[in-house]
Image (cartoon, rainbow, N blue to C red):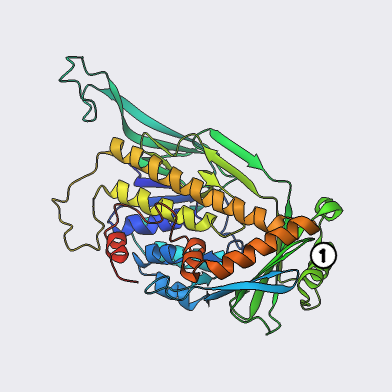
Amino acid sequence: MDSDVIIVGAGTTGLTLANLLAAAGIRSAVYEAKAAPDTRMRAIGVTPPTLEILDRFGIGGPLVQRGVAVRRAEVYGDRRLLGSVSFDGIHSRYPFILSVPQTRIEHLLRSAAEANNLVRVHYGAEVVSVEPGATPSRADDNLRTGDSGLEPRPVVRPTGITVRFRDGRSVNGLYACICSGASGFRPFPVMRRRRYRRLFLIGDYPDTGRLGDIARLYFSRDGSVESFPLPAGMRRWIVQLTGRASRTVLDEATVSAMLTTYVNRRTGIRVPAGLPHWWSSFRPERHELAHFARFGMFAAGDVAHSMSPIGGQGMNTGIADAELAADLIAGRTMTPESPAVTSHTPMIDMVSGTRLYEKVRRKAGRSASRRAAASMFVGTVGGVPGSAIRNALLRAALTLIPDRAIASHFAMLTIPGHRSPLSFTARTISSRPQ
């Protein structure tokens, strides 16, 4: 075998998985189709459960030092404050959502992986197929045939994985984890897909100094604007385009004019003149694979279940996928942080592990996707009557529902399976009073 585990994709999900496996003493090789690390800013929100996972190999704390702790969010309707949410008290160590560009997260993950002799990271390696080797077996621990007198039927057991690349090379491993992103190589067919017509612009500008470390959500009858702090005195603006603007061909000058116009019109705030430091656009899409795990292959992150970026659920869901996959591959009921882990720690049958992964991660992915879709729907209600009803409901919710309940929802602490059910650290943290 070339490696114990072959990981396809060197994004946050794949690199997190490699580091978690290394912490368990398992070799992995990471193969990325791009020729070099991605420098796009992309996602920025890191939730407390994700920071817990990163703590398992020592980068949760260093990442916090590189980001901005968002402890409060304010919600506006047609420029009037509807209410606010405080994240104080939602977590004993991380009572906030961390705002940090995905590039910084991946840099820390990559540095940790490359410093570990159990991980190898390769760029410019485009995967075209992942093929499980398999042999039939007459024994299946999960079949109860004794009482019925039936002959046990043959069960196909995986004996390894072969990954083939565009240039004709191939490598072999015991397991393969596909973390190739929403548009990358897919190991299984797509079961569900939905494309949304809404178009959003993202622009990162220097902060004017008025907003500080507070997240702000602006909902107007003409569309939504979201604003989040970034490190180094920067701020991200996410603007919904409506009508004819959503069909405009975008270039730097057009994007700059649109961001400046719509931010000012909907919030009353002027972003600094000139082009944004970084900009992008997206039309949300949602898909889900028919399988998340089969025959020693796992699909994790956006390749398994993509969702709207609104609400910041996707990257965190992928990292949670990686944690459970790592725990199953490690084959332990506890992770190495537990003093009870020894060479006699009971192993998990991979057939049962595959079923567990399918059940837990599909449920978590669907929950996160629904929340992302709901957040997008709330923000994009337009027109005078619809906007007025939406704002009234938001004001009531922010007034009547306790801060902790709302904050826990947006911090993904109420997502089912937000931590691996096999993780010793998850059980320890969840047992602490908060």
Q: Which residue is mark 1?
A: 258
**What amino acid type is highlighted by mark number 1?**
Met
- Position above or below: 130 against 147: below
- The residue lying furthest to the bottom in this view is 209
Q: Secondary structure at mark 1?
A: helix
- Position above or below: 101 against 32: below
224 to the left or right of 164: right
- The residue lying furthest to the top in this view is 150
Image coords of residue 52 (percent x, y): 38, 65
Image point 35% across, 63% down: which residue? 116
Tell me the quarter of the picture where residue 231 sits: bottom right
Image coords of residue 188 (percent x, y): 50, 34
> Tag 1: Cα neighbours inside 10 Å, few (<14), some, or many (≥20)?
some
Image coords of residue 76 (percent x, y): 68, 70
Count the labels in the image: 1
318 to the left or right of 276: left
Image coords of residue 158 (percent x, y): 32, 32
- Asked whether residue 124 is in view, the answer is no
- Asked whether residue 290 is in view, the answer is yes
Image point 55% across, 64% down: which residue? 102
- Position above or below: 254 against 147: below
